[in-house]
Amino acid sequence: MLSRGTGIALTAKRALGIGRISLIRGFRTTTSYKAKQDSSDEVFTRLNDDTDPKRNKLFEYHWGTWMNNDAAEKQKRITKFSISGLNILTGVLEDVANAKDVDKKGELKMMDGNVNVLTKNLKELTGSSFENIKQVVSIHEGMFHHVYLVNLNNGKSMILRLPYKLYPDYYTSRAVNSEVATTEFLREQLGLKVPKVLAYSGQFDNYLNYPFILSEYIEGDLLMKDWYPLVEGKVEDKKVSNELHKVITPIFDFFKAVTKPVFTGYGSLYFKQDYPQGKPAIDGQEKFVLGPTTLKPYYEKGSNLDQKEVDKFVGPWALDQPLKMVSDLAQVNIASLRKEQNNRHAEEALRVYKALLATGEKLFDLKSSSIPNFKEMIKPRLFIPDLDPMNVITSENGNYFVDFEDSTVTPFILNPAPKFVEYTGPKVFHLSEIPDLEKLDADLKDQYEYMQKRTRNQVYWEKSLAENTSKLAISAAPAVKKIRESFTSALKDKNPKDYLNIEASLADLEMLWKSFSEDHVVGEGDCPIKFTEEDLDKFKEDFEDLQKDLSSTPFAATGGWVPQDVFENLLNKGLIVKDGENYKIDIDKALKDAPTKEKDDGRAAN
């Protein structure tokens, strides 16, 4: 254990925060992990003046605008932290790194600062001493966290990552603690290239007055720079294959390494000191344990539940209950929906989640499955939801992977392909399959071409799976995808009508259940749910209405969020206009001024 009273001495200048610091609101592009700085956004402030209003822009969210409730959404994403506290913390870490009487082999906890320090990683701070932070630069504003580059006056840099206040504090604590443990597991146990974590805290009561992860800075371009998912070409085209595999191969290699370890149960990874009651994640090792999942869907719909209610359904789950995480996802949604009154969509969603609960632990035949290598695919393996070229830094020392939030040990068979290659729409393997393609209108032709390219990209991933992890390849079989689809659709349930996607997959499953059961693919016996003709007719009508809403509502797919450069462009052209406290599209002007169609390079098609 370590505290500020253990002989670690701060210089007076560092402790008092004497001196000036430069603050810059820069940005990370889709192709670079370097801070691009605009001097017009640079301000100077005294280190110890945490009330200086000139700092506010550094903490605010600027990367997008919501068509509805913009002010409230941005308020949730303010990451105001103590810069003077960060300065003190970095000084403490430097002193720890250079102290001869501090154990450099393990993790030490700073008792009075609620900060965990990974002492073995602190050599990143050794070298020439420093007095203060020189500069803090905002380099990335994601959907769930804000990333800052912290430059010291000795030339060294670190990355500070702060989660937004979108979830209860207990979830934030779990998410931070688990992400750090997962990062260290990947680096220490698997030898993978990930940034070294220096210090972290899942609580607000620390030097920064904000939960954080402080890690080494890896400079380089993003792998996204090489990703062109809508490049023209068929699966068989060697040139296209080589181009897309520049990105697919390094991510698949990382994925393959991650899926090798088999764990003792299901849940998210934690350090033993952060979750003392946890069972060892790997037999014979005490450092890493399994605890509650940090998958956000288990907490998103539970905002009207207290922690005790939520904790009934978030694991960890025993080795002999591989499908309980499916039924528990249904349970936590049911508990939340029951508290919503006079809400038609909530009533319909409740009915659907009850159906998911009924099928959840019968999705696969656990006793006598006929699926090849089923026992391998049901084993607990680490699932990282955000494997993406945006989260890979190509440095001079190789590819470094970042962003392991939500990572959870799951039955492998439940996991979809990474989002950047996943495609759940209609499959088009060859455009030659489409009758009279050249005679179709341009928009419809473009849709078919889009389907073909997205299908092709997923095929490349699945071919890699078959060629390199043959015992797990059947997880990509159409029947297996169809069976788990109700669960993966539930994981994507964010909007009031998204339950219809779950219902669609359940209706398909009910239709196929008899043959699947007879073949020992799903659980034995009759399907536990039943759709009448009336149910199916109503579902069809509701689902068609949903598709119309999505196609007629601008930015519906992003929940009304618009990238800031796009928003400002449309606002300046008068296509977006104020609507009270919200914004709306001026449909008449949009139709009148419809822009000429341009060819898309596909970078955003993840």
Image (cartoon, grey):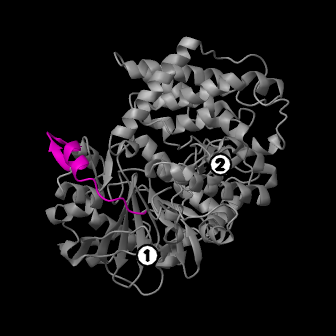
- The reply, left or right, for residue 305 in relation to residue 342 is right
**Residue marked by disc 2:** 433
Q: Position of residue 171 (x, y in %)?
A: 45, 42
Q: What is the magenta range?
A: 576-599
| Position above or below: 355 against 601 | above
Residue 95's tag is 1
Residue shown at the point (29%, 46%) measured from the top left: 76
| Position above or below: 496 against 591 | above
Question: Which one is in front, 192 or 307?
Answer: 192
Contact check, label 1 and label 2, Cβ < 8 Å: no
- The reply, left or right, for residue 582 in relation to residue 109 is left
- The reply, left or right, for residue 519 in relation to residue 592 is right
Instruction: Estimate how packed mark 2 is, as few (under 14), some (14 to 19) or many (20 or more) residues with alpha carbons within 10 Å.
Output: few
Q: Position of residue 525 (x, y in %)?
A: 78, 17
Answer whether residue 436 is visible to the viewer in this image.
yes
Question: Which one is in front, 474 or 171?
Answer: 474
Q: Quadrant of residue 290?
A: top right
Instruction: Estimate how packed mark 1 is, as few (under 14), some (14 to 19) or many (20 or more) residues with alpha carbons within 10 Å.
Output: many
Sequence-first tag of 1 and 2:
1
Answer whether residue 178 is visible to the viewer in this image.
no
Cα gap from disc 1 to disc 2, whole angstroms:
67 Å
Residue shown at the point (20%, 60%) measured from the top left: 56
The amino acid pointed to by label 1 is Asp
Residue shown at the point (48%, 53%) measured from the top left: 446
The amino acid pointed to by label 2 is Glu
| Position above or below: 51 against 316 | below
Q: Is residue 270 magenta?
A: no
| Position above or below: 171 against 215 | above
